[in-house]
Image: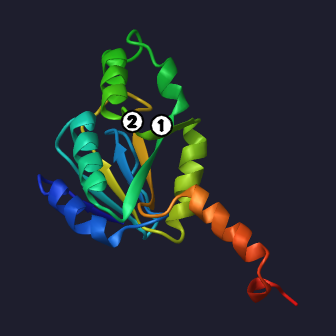
Amino acid sequence: MNARNGSSWLHTLSQRLPLLGHRNWIVIADAAYPLQTAPGIETIVADTDLTTALKAALGEIEAAPHVRPVVHLDAELDFVTDADAPGAEALRAALREALDGQQTVRLPHEEIIAKLDAAGRSFNILLIKTRETIPYTSVFIELDCGYWNARAESALRQAMAGSPLTSNA
């Protein structure tokens, strides 16, 4: 756990991104997101709104050739109303715009937290905490390999399965 405050969050993200890769995560979190105790989770504070931090993070990720984002959103966000959380509808619209074209998965919050917890046991997570005060708005970005995809991996595994070099005989 490493918590820092200030305007250097974008600098920290830029420094950490070359070190991060497949199976690492970057979380753009709302203000109530808890400080976690796992040693692989670095928490920094961005004194900005969630969509500004998200756009900046996605810009950094998109400029990095070694990773690509797989975005996870809380399924609960679709059901948060302006009556319960003023500004929820506008934020949903801003997130749709910011995430246009991104591979996005919606799961219940607890399922995403379980994935994050499992990843945090072996892989680093950079958590950027924002000023956002609407619930279920945290954006969980799982990093995947930027120069390899699922189709190529499947073809590789299929080729290996038929090879005498990989048999257990």
Query: Which picture quadrant has residue 35?
Result: bottom left
Q: Residue at x 41, y 67 (%)?
A: 21
The residue located at (34%, 38%) in the rendering is: 30
Task: Name, please, the residue furthest toward the top.
Answer: 83
**Residue with the most extreme left position:** 7
Location of the N terminus by quadrant is bottom left
Q: What secondary structure is found at the residue carrying circle 1?
A: strand
The residue positioned 43% from the left and 46% from the top of the image is 140
- In the picture, the quarter occupied by the C terminus is bottom right
Q: In terms of sequence position, does the residue under pointer 2 or pointer 1 come before the other? A: 1
Residue 120 placed where, x, y %? 50, 64
Instruction: Name the residue carrying label 2.
Output: 101
Work out whether residue 36 or residue 158 is closer to the camera in this orientation and state it.
158
Q: Is residue 135 left or right of residue 97?
A: right
Q: Nearer the viewer, residue 143 or 159?
A: 159
The disc placed on residue 7 is none
Query: Vertically, is 58 above or below 74?
Result: below
Q: Amino acid at mark 2?
A: Gly
Contact between labelled residues 1 and 2, with CB atoms less than 8 Å apart: no
The one nearer the camera, 66 or 118, is 66
Q: Is residue 47 left or right of residue 104?
A: left
Select label 2 or label 1 by which is in front: 2
**Image location of residue 65, percent across then percent down:** 32, 62
Q: Is residue 8 left or right of residue 68?
A: left
Within 10 Å of the Cα at label 1, are there few (<14), some (14-19), or many (20+) other Cα atoms? many
Mark 2, secondary structure of its residue: loop
Give the residue number, with chain letter if any, for mark 1. Answer: 73
Give the CA distance from mark 2 to mark 1. Answer: 15 Å
Colouring convention used in this rendered image of the protein: rainbow
| Residue 64, image x, y percentages | 29, 61
- Note whether 24 is above or below 27 in the view shown: below
